[in-house]
Image: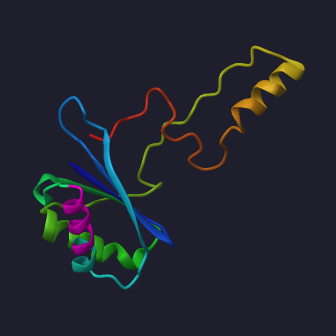
Amino acid sequence: MLLAVEVGNTNIKFGLFEVDGVAAGTLVHTWRSVTDRHKTGDDLAAQVDSMLRLNAVARSSVTRVAVASVVPPLYRALSQMSTRYFGCRPEFLSAARQSIVCRRARAATTSGASAARSASSNGPEPSGPGAGIGTSPGRRSIT
C-alpha cells in the first residue's frame, strides 16, 4: 500500500492507497491530524501506526510513502518516519518536479444565453497553477 501524506500549515492529511491488483489506485482509508512543526519522526510514526491499527491495517503492508508538504521543518521527521518504520525512502512531491496533465477545454458548441446557463450550472472552470489536476481522462494513477 502507498501512504500518501499532505502536510499543510493547519492539517496533515493521510491517505492509504492500494497499489497492487485490480484495486490498484483505490483510496482505502483517510484521516487527518493537526500540523505540529515540532513533531519528530517517532511522533508521526506513532500517530500513523495507531490509525493503521484502528483500521485493521498491518504496518508492514505500507511499502511506499509519498509526501507533499508546505512545511519544510517536517521534512526530516517525515523522512525518518518513512525509513525507520516503513522501510522505504519517502517520495517528496513538488510542483517543480512533477509533470502535470492539464485539463483540456472542450470547444464551445452552444452560444449566447444557453452557454452561460450551461457554464453556471457546471460551476466555474478551475484556473491558476495546477487547475484541473487529476480531471483529465489521461491522468496517471498512483501505482
Question: For the view shown, which residue lies furthest in the top direction?
Answer: 109
Q: Please determine whether, in this image, residue 110 is positioned above or below residue 127.
A: above
* Magenta stretch encompasses residue 49: yes
The one of 104 and 27 positioned closer to us in this rendering: 27
Residue 122 position, x and y percent, is: 70, 31
Instruction: Judge left or right: residue 131 versus residue 50.
Output: right
Q: Please determine whether, in this image, residue 70 is positioned above or below residue 93.
A: below
Numbered range of the magenta stretch:
46-55
Instruction: Judge left or right: residue 68 versus residue 42.
Output: right
Give the residue at x 14% y 71%.
84
Q: Please determine whether, in this image, residue 64 is positioned above or below residue 102.
A: below
Q: Please determine whether, in this image, residue 39 is positioned above or below residue 110.
A: below
Main SS class of the magenta portion in the image: helix
Query: Quadrant location of the C terminus?
Result: top left
Residue 135 position, x and y percent, is: 51, 34
* Magenta stretch encompasses residue 20: no
Instruction: Judge left or right: residue 108 versus residue 3.
Output: right
Give the residue at x 41% y 81%.
37
